[in-house]
Amino acid sequence: MPTTRITVAAGDGIGPEIMESTLRILDAAGADLAYDHVEVGEKVYEQGHTSGIAPESWDTIRRNRVLLKAPITTPLGGGYKSLNVTLRKSLNLFANVRPTKSYAPYVSSPHPGMNLVVVRENEEDLYAGIEHQQTQEVTQVLKLITRPGCERIVRYAFEYARAYGRRRVTCMTKDNIMKITDGLFHRVFEEVAADYPDLESDHQIIDIGAARLAAQPEQFDVIVTTNLYGDILSDIAAQIAGSVGLAGSANIGETMAMFEAVHGSAPDIAGKDVANPSGLLLAATQLLVHIGQAEIAESIKNAWLCTLESGLHTPDIYRPQLSEREVGTRAFTDAVIEHLGREPRQLTPVHYREGGISVQVAEAPRRAKQLRGVDVFLDWDADGRDPDELGRGLEAAIGAAWRLKMITNRGVKVYPEGLPETFRTDHWRCRFVPAEGDTVPFGAVLDLQRDVDRAGFEVIKTENLYLFDGEAGYSLGQGE
Ligand code: NAD
């Protein structure tokens, strides 16, 4: 296999020390890597680059496709952009992969049996940043869940599970409520799971799943989920593991990938030879598996586990009753190198599959699409906010082509036959369907809006209602 050239960013604070330690271990283990160094972080911000990265570094990162990054110090004050967000968005890093494990009894942990990984979708969901306020009282955000986005992340989770010898992949969504968006994620999960009969799979509703994760993390192996849930779950997992300082994480894209420690640049201990290099080192082992050097990754991880077992611990994990001796960054690094080639006795040795991880997403068959109606949203704030008054006004305003099927307020039906107790804001969804037949040309939607506008109602937006192969691509109202 040819030498893999990767980009390396030493970062700020303890970054350079832990990067030196990590590269020393990679080299001693015989990793077939060559390095191009780029500068990111504080100095680059100070030179006036608001994202913490100089324009010329992009060429190196994009050419090499794989970036090993130490933490950086984010300058305080306004005007600076997060380097991580910039890297993630610019390089299309769709998966965030965070293994969380307890190393008890050598490192104290409230959950000794915990050994899980959260695979979080990184680009879609509520993080698309599409928010609106269109009435005095109501705000909204657009939650985008795409079929290729779901398939890519779910396949990645299953491929990851295979590569790392894991047994089960758990999907978490809230598809009992969000039947279309979260429903798609769950459905794609079931489809993809069928391609991996060697792995167990299950689905849990996110609220009970998160509660179980917090109470019994030992029950989980690989968890795959959408962006927001994954954000929350990976923080819960990190918090309860008791070893954030030992955690690495990966951000994976279709062609690019970035590997880093979970912790920050720890300026309080920088330059003192006390930082624990483990987070970045474990991220580097993820890098090796990603590029197909699983055997080297295995040997480093097992040597590192032996070092924990030997009781040589950096101050952050040193406990007199658990540890043998407190050591600095360099001595810890030397110990890992000395243990190369050995397997741990108490902690479980790791075994990875050769071949790297790659994901192919198939193109989904196109389905017949048919316009079935339209939801017209109004800003309407007449005295009393009486839904019957609104309903009668709209019925008088529209032409013969349309029928007003229902009006909802915050998703609750208020017309026809609403309850007077229902709380009503100034934001109304009015669902129109064709008076005859089950489809309608788009021109009729424009006519409808014009009629509603002429009758004095303020249209703030519309959502078309489509059928896909006869299946509703919109949430049905009560009683539909
Ligand atoms: P931090 O993770 O840097 O430090 C929190 C505490 O943990 C400190 O007491 C620190 O000494 C300790 N610690 C962290 N890593 C350690 C290690 N490897 N070994 C031993 N002890 C360790 O978090 P913070 O203090 O909130 O942030 C410091 C800086 O890091 C900030 O500028 C923040 O913006 C930045 N940061 C960067 C990243 C990144 O680049 N990915 C991530 C988080 C924070």
Image (spheres, rainbow, N blue to C red):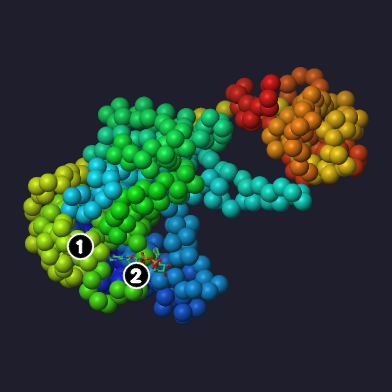
Amino acid at the residue labelled 1: Tyr
Looking at the rendered structure, the secondary structure element under dot 1 is: loop
Q: Which residue is mark 1?
A: 318
Q: Nearer the viewer, residue 145 or 234?
A: 234
**Residue 375 location, x and y as percent?**
74, 34
Residue 154 in sight in this render: no
**Residue 315 location, x and y as percent?**
22, 66
**Residue 288 location, x and y as percent?**
24, 54
On screen, residue 299 versus residue 383, left or right, reads left
The residue positioned 61% from the left and 45% from the top of the image is 142
Q: Is residue 384 above or below residue 89?
A: above
**Residue 200 location, x and y as percent?**
31, 29
Which residue is most to the top?
A: 437
Disc 2 CB within 8 Å of nearest ligand 1 atom:
yes
Amino acid at the residue labelled 2: Ala
Q: Quadrant of the C terminus?
A: top right
Looking at the rendered structure, the secondary structure element under dot 2 is: loop
Q: Nearer the viewer, residue 65 or 399?
A: 399
Q: Which residue is mark 2?
A: 266
Count of numbered tags? 2
Residue 444 sits in quarter: top right
Q: Nearer the viewer, residue 220 or 51?
A: 220
Residue 47 in sight in this render: yes
Answer few, some or many: residues within 10 Å of disc 1's Cα (few below 14, many 20 plus, some between 14 and 19).
Answer: some
Gap in angstroms between the C-alphas marked 2 and 1:
17 Å
Q: Determine the quadrant in which ligand 1 lies.
A: bottom left
Q: Are marks 2 and 1 in contact (CB under 8 Å)?
A: no
On screen, residue 304 versus residue 450, left or right, reads left
The residue positioned 59% from the left and 53% from the top of the image is 129
Which residue is most to the bottom?
A: 47
Closer to the observer: label 2 or label 1? 1
